[in-house]
Image (spheres, rainbow, N blue to C red):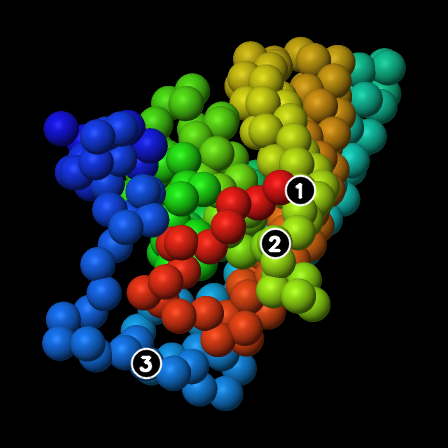
Amino acid sequence: MLCTRCRTRTAVTADDLCTFCSGTRPPLPGGVMAPVPGPGGWTAGAWPRSPVALARAVTVLLGVVIAADVFAVVTGLRVRSRWGALAEGGSPDVHMRAAQIAERYFVLAALVQGTALVVTAIVFVVWFHRTRRNAEVFHAGVQRLGPGWAIGGWFVPIANLWIPYRVASGVWEASAQTGPSDGWRTVPKTPLKLWWGAWVLSLLATRVAEKIWSRAFEPEEVARAAGLVVASDALDIVAAVLAILFVRALTRMQVERAARAVNPVLAVSDAPLT
């Protein structure tokens, strides 16, 4: 029978929890102590592992995504302007060629966006999984889903609108800084909530805009669809900026948590967050 909390390990207690979630993980054999954290609180070859380098890579790539979105917004506005002029009775000989050229740049911008998004998504998921693994060390008891969901949760249709958020919420709680007296304190999830809300809104807006764009044929329809795509790209910029803030905030929390020199063996027995 699987643990009723993490759904990934075998239940061993009377209340159907595993050793991690119940806080009864046995000590290392032979009385061996866990490695002492080195500079910055991170140890070589032992959990937790530093997410700093991955966070920096994600931040840079999100910057590339933002730049690609800005390029898409500029080209989208040109498409909207050129096709709008044609819809208002402009000369086909003058405006049609300009509209077609603008649309070519618009398609190029979409290709750049797609490439940047795929690369960024891969690195982001690696960073996300790293932070989830660290959370298992910091406080396994507050994790609602197993580490595998930090990757798999993104690929479940419809459910990917909330599964990654549940994973991130548990990671955020486990990574919360300890106070001066080593007691737990609640850290508001504002960066997480803002990023997730903006990302879901951007995702839905993009799907709607792309569907309308694919069905646009008349000049006025193309102009209207281009305006919707531009709006979805603007939302994507907001989501990317908020993603950077979330990544930096969570990474900083994990660095500070590790700097407390948490014993990996005893981490799961920490007092729960209030």
Question: Contact (CB < 8 A) between labels 3 and 1?
Answer: no
Q: Amino acid at mark 1?
A: Lys
| Disc 2 secondary structure class | loop
Q: Residue at x 66, y 51 (%)?
A: 185
Question: Contact (CB < 8 A) between labels 2 and 1?
Answer: no
Q: Amino acid at mark 3?
A: Pro
| Disc 3 secondary structure class | loop
Q: Nearer the viewer, residue 165 or 233?
A: 165
| Horizontal and vertical percent position of residue 180 | 69, 67
Can I make out residue 156 in this image?
Answer: yes
| Horizontal and vertical percent position of residue 220 | 75, 13
**Apparent side of residue 88 relative to residue 268 in the rendered image (left or right):** right
Location of mark 1 (residue): 189
Which circle's residue, 3 or 1, is located before the other in the chain?
Answer: 3
| Horizontal and vertical percent position of residue 85 | 84, 23
**Apparent side of residue 19 relative to residue 209 in the rendered image (left or right):** left
**Apparent side of residue 211 relative to residue 197 in the rendered image (left or right):** left
Location of mark 3 (residue): 35
Q: CA distance from mark 2 to mark 3?
A: 23 Å
Location of mark 2 (residue): 184
Q: Quadrant of residue 176?
A: bottom right
For the N terminus, the quadrant is top left
